Amino acid sequence: MVRALIGSILVGVMCPLVGAYTVTRNLAFIGDALAHAVLPGIVFGYIVGVNPAIAAVPTGVAVAVLVRTLSRRAGLSSDTSIGILFATMFALGLVMLATASTIRVNIEDLLLGQILAITPTGIYVSLGITVMVILGLFAFHHWLLFTSFDPLGAQVNSTRASVADHAFLVMLALVVVIGIQAAGIVLVMAMLVTPAATAYLLARRFVSIMMTGAALGTAAAVTGLYVSYYFNVSAGPAMTLVASGIFVLVVLFRPRATPA
Amino acid sequence: MSLQDVTVEVGGHLALSNVSFDVEPGTLMGVVGPNGAGKSTLFNAIAGLLPVRQGKVTLHHGDQQSGGLAYVPQRESVNWRIPVTVMDVVMMGRCCRMGWFQRPGKRDREIVNACLGRVGLWDHRSALMTELSGGQRQRVFVGRALAQEASVLLLDEAFSGVDLAAQEALVGVLRTLRDEGRIVLLATHDLTNLAGRFDQVLCLNRHVCACGPPEQVFTSEVMEQMYGAHGVGLNTDGES
């Protein structure tokens, strides 16, 4: 239970920190796509006996980079590239899962998350990713704010804008890997988007959105974990419902309107 | 800054054809033309956002360095959903002067404060961008270019949605930048008061129709090239 609690807190903090950008940059779809696209990595991890969280990291990073490359090379919109990659990778993962007779994995655990079964290695991977992403968010903060607000102006200003954009996709992929362990492939987007969107309704400054989102995300993840434990339901749906409940309350009773 | 026979294609269509002109340091130039004339395409080509199929864009040594060129995009290109303050936006101009893990230092803050003063927005430094008028927003972007220490400024449709008084305030700030030796190019489809505002005017309609002092370029022939038969009756006071 202690491991599950640590895992939940990491998910609750990290998803909204990155989610603040995801929400304000209209990138929710790519978060969802990355979650589905890491399935082949997870299954490969089970096949070769490596912790699935470790195996999912290179897959997520590769897909994040591929999305950009495919958009540029094929001249397609990001949404189209993401749609193609997301479906292809998820299908590949399902085929691998069906044909690998040596592994026994409950598909429901992959899709909906099973934080109560998180291993010590899973926690170490999550902690490592947390440190990396927090350092990345710190290093790239000004550039990420610039490219999020005025992508053209930032691109003209320096080539570093493009580096920051790529780095953000990699950080998003890494956080998705943490999130999958708790919320599962299908519902990780809820942890990425809902607490950050709730914070967007409450906070005035961007950094405040990140911090408020992290607090709300932690509250949702930990509450969801206890609901999952005591009522014997999957952690992912429990966390999602708590996060959505907070969102609805804030929409109904928020103290002030957001800027246009 | 010099452009020689610059030809640009967008989506397989010719957007600019054989565009050539020179701009001396200390010039405030208006780039005018109808919608679809290629004004934004020209700026994107100068800024390196679009590849040039043929020809050459030459920037002076200082302008080619990181941050030497500042681009103020059209209002539609900015993500207003990001809640940033006036101070945040002007500080973005210092990004190219800071290392990855570096936070804004004392010098950065001093420069940003000075830039806010120069564009007359010190009192609004804590306001969100969405709380400002169109003219004030444009001045924030000019402040960002100043903080960036850019020697070339490209402002795309900076008068769009900005009332006359605010346009004049913006031009006043741009004149001070011109007087410091910077090159300022401002694209507009608004022909009002061009003679009083710009040193040079580039008339564009996928090719250069004319380039020179505003009082010389707006001949009937040039207006017809830009706006067709309806353009002959227009004058640069915006009346027909």
Image: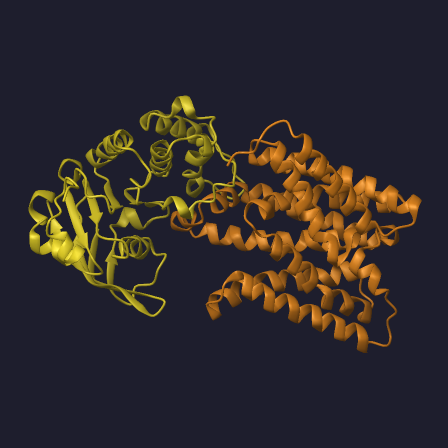
Chain colours: A orange, B yellow
Q: Is residue A186 left or right of residue B67?
A: right
Tell me residue B235's x, y (percent): 12, 44
Q: Is residue A235 above or below residue B167?
A: below
Residue B179 in view here: yes
Tell me residue B139's x, y (percent): 34, 33
Q: Is residue A194 left or right of residue B8?
A: right
Residue at horizontal 83 percent and vertical 61 percent from the top = A108
The quadrant in which residue A80 appears is bottom right
Q: Nearer the viewer, residue A69 or B58?
A: A69
Residue at horizontal 18 percent and vertical 37 percent from the top = B197
Q: Is residue A249 left or right of residue B184?
A: right
Q: Nearer the viewer, residue A226 or A48?
A: A226
Tell me residue B30's x, y (percent): 20, 45
Viewport quadrant of the N terminus of chain A: top right
The quadrant in which residue A104 appears is bottom right
Q: Nearer the viewer, residue B4 or B72?
A: B72
Q: Is residue B28 above or below residue B105?
A: below
Q: Nearer the viewer, residue A49 or B132?
A: B132
Report the number of discs.
0
Residue at horizontal 65 percent and vertical 35 percent from the top = A211
Q: Is residue A40 above or below residue B115?
A: below
Of all residues, the one furthest to the top in this rendering is: B123
Tell me residue A81's x, y (percent): 55, 66
The quadrant in which residue B116 appears is top left
Residue B209 in view here: no
Q: Is residue A213 above or below residue B61?
A: above
